[in-house]
Amino acid sequence: MRFLRTLSAAVVTVATVALAAPASAQTAPDPTDPLSYDYSDCPLLPSGIDPTGWRCEVHLATGAITVGRQRLTGIPMRLVHAEGPRPDGTTGQIFGGLQSRPTAVPGGRMTVQVRYAGYADLVGNGPDPGGLYLMLTVRGPGLGEHCTIGTVADPIRTHAARVGATTTIPTDPPIKQFTLQDTAFTVPASSGCGPRAHRVDARFGLPSATGNVLTLETAYTYQMY
């Protein structure tokens, strides 16, 4: 199962950076332009793996997420992973990284940043098929440096599926564009927010068992190892 999990803790704490070179931190990359796809987070393949047939995929997404009573839009994300044949003939995958930037919460001075929370199955053959676990880092006055919605131990467990048609841009390799959506995940109460945790939970309406929605307008392409 190590193909389904990131082996380095550094990926979990990845810093906020520009989502794709050569775009700046203020400019969203053009998902129809092959030059927008940055492969610097492609993971190394483990020893003993034949790289023949393995590829690194870069996904660029603009997301909207409803968490409890708050809807956040225009969230930029870049997700990188590798996939290819394992020695037993099944498809393996190795997570590379998830990057995003802080997004303002309407009506106040809080921001949230989407972070990876320790599990990704982008092929659909793992113990939680199609899963991507997330957490939201929350920043604001008096919240400190450890305030999150979701944690690695208790993540936001999303299972987004494609909705609607897939568009193919005939570059070499091609760029695929589609929409992903999940409307069935739950969101835990905030964690690590100190004495002002109640403000975070009240602002978002947490914990939230229903009404949570994740929608991602996604494009991806790849390069071979």
Image (cartoon, helix red, strand yellow):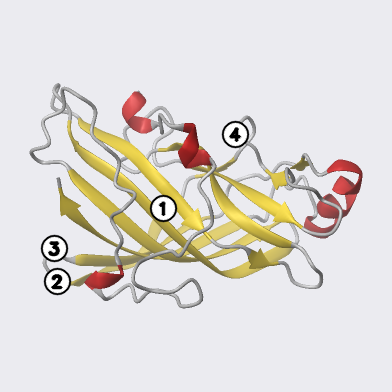
Q: Is residue 172 above or below residue 181?
A: below
Q: CA distance from mark 4 to mark 1?
A: 22 Å
Q: Earlier in the sequence, mark 4 or mark 3?
A: 4
Frontmost of labels 2 and 1 is 2
Q: Residue furthest left?
A: 52
Tell whether label 3 touches label 1 (CB within 8 Å).
Answer: no
Q: State the residue position of label 1.
A: 161
Q: Within 10 Å of the Cα at label 4, are there few (<14), some (14-19), or many (20+) other Cα atoms?
A: some
Tell me where residue 3 appears, x and y as whole percent.
Answer: 31, 29
Per the rendering, the mark at residue 152 is 4
Q: State the residue position of label 3.
A: 173
Q: Within 10 Å of the Cα at label 2, are there few (<14), some (14-19), or many (20+) other Cα atoms?
A: few
Q: Residue at x 45, y 65 (%)?
A: 18
Q: Residue at x 60, y 61 (%)?
A: 65
Q: Which three-letter amino acid code belongs to the residue tagged 2?
A: Thr
Name the side, left or right, on which 25 lies relative to 58: right
* Secondary structure of residue under mark 4: loop
